[in-house]
Amino acid sequence: MAEKVKNDFLTYKGKPLVRNGDTIYYGSMSDDYVIMMRITSKKEFEGLDLASKVTVQLLKTDPDASAKERIVKTSEKKGLFAAMDIAEIWLERALRG
């Protein structure tokens, strides 16, 4: 599902994924919207830390908007898979509409 492309960004369903610590951005900053996922809780499984709670936010990329105005939608999901699922749906709908 995720693949490496020429610009060295990992992608998911054709959109870039960029991680910085426990924060993951999904989408292109040149688009009108982007998704920010923040891992708020982890649990250990066979020596690996897995995300158990992830906060998902649909954000406007408008630099003139205040921080509060940029947040369009927020949700908390159990696990990264559920977070990526809703993130992809929200971003597709926002970019279409």
Image (spheres, rainbow, N blue to C red):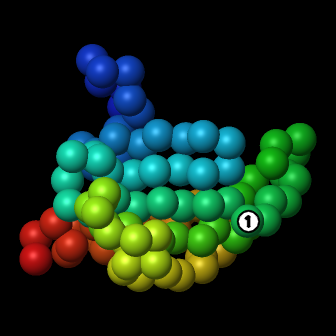
Quadrant where the C terminus sits is bottom left
In the rendered image, residue 56, in percent from the top left (x then y), is placed at 51, 70
Q: Is residue 51 visible?
A: yes
Left of 63 or right of it: where is 94? left
Quadrant housing residue 1: top left
Foreground residue, 13 or 72?
72
x then y, percent, for residue 64:
29, 63
Residue toward you, 89 or 74: 74
The residue lying at 84 percent from left, 59 percent from top is 43
Q: Amino acid at mark 1?
A: Thr
Image check: 14 left or right of 16? left
To which residue does mark 1 refer? 40
- Using residue 70 as the reference point, say whether residue 28 is left or right of it: left
Residue 81 drawn at (x, y percent): 53, 62
Label 1: few (<14), some (14–19) or many (≥20) C-alpha neighbours in 10 Å: few
Give above or below for 74 relative to 51: below
Question: Can residue 86 be spotted in the picture?
Answer: no
Residue 16, image quadrant: top left
Image point (68%, 42%), residue name: 21
Front position in the image: 61 or 55: 61
In the rendered image, the vertical position of residue 22 relative to residue 71, given as above or below: above
Considering only vertical position in the picture, is 29 above or below 72? above
